[in-house]
Image (tube, helix red, strand yellow):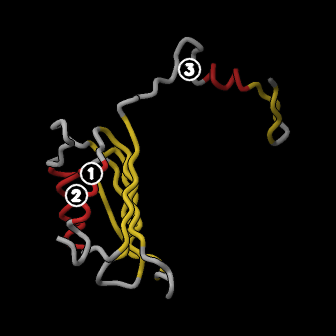
Amino acid sequence: MIYFLFNFCFRIEDIFKNRGYKKEERHIIDKSVGTLTYEHTGNINKHDLDLALQTLLWEKNVKNSKGDTVDVLRLKGLISTDDSDKRLVVQAVHELYDSCYTSPWGKDEERINRIVLIGRNLERSVIETLFMKCIKGSS
């Protein structure tokens, strides 16, 4: 197949060949990696959230029901905290995580905490238990 870009003519096969791609080499999908989304209304205590993330990402002390360590490769979240009217965005790659406040929640907008995790040994009940401890007013 021939493509034209900025008046240059090229074959996609030539680009792959020049970059070392071989037809024999196939991309392998790691089926042990999965995705889980946690959603819950209410306000999260930021200090408790930081402790939960540190336990999950740094200390790796969170285990699923089989006793396997939950291994988070990537995490993204949009959080409603009890100390701000702004959204808290949380992002993590392996052990590194960061959070920052962004735009304010709308006056009539329902504050739904949403955290998406990509990793291994993810189990909904374990993740829910971990983050429910951060919801203000729940114990």
> Is 76 placed above or below 22 here?
below
**Residue to which mark 2 is pinned:** 129
Q: Residue furthest bottom?
A: 107
Image position of 88 with respect to 104: above or below: above
Q: Which residue is mark 1?
A: 125
- Residue in the image at 56% along x and 20% along y: 20
Task: Please name the residue that numbered disc 3 is placed on.
Answer: 20
Q: In the rendered image of this protein, does residue 56 appear above or below residue 11?
A: below
Pair 2/3: label in front: 2
Q: Residue at x 29, y 84 (%)?
A: 83
x%, y% of residue 24? 55, 11
- Horizontally, is 139 left or right of 95 in the view? left
The alpha-carbon separation of the residues under discs 3 and 1 comes to 44 Å
Q: Identify the residue at horizontal 46%, vertical 77% (top origin).
A: 110
**Proximity of marks 1 and 2: CB atoms separated by less than 8 Å:** yes
133 or 15, which lies in front? 133
Whether residue 42 sits left or right of residue 47 in the image: it is: right
Residue 82, percent from left and from top: 29, 81
Residue 39, percent across and down? 39, 62
Three-letter amino acid code of the residue under disc 2: Thr
Residues under labels 1 and 2: Cα distance? 6 Å
Q: Quadrant of the N terminus?
A: top right
First-in-chain label (2 vs 3): 3
Q: Label 1 amino acid?
A: Ser
**Identity, as a three-letter code, of the amino acid under mark 3:** Gly
Secondary element at image label 3? loop
Neighbours of disc 3 within 10 Å: few (<14), some (14-19), many (20+):
few
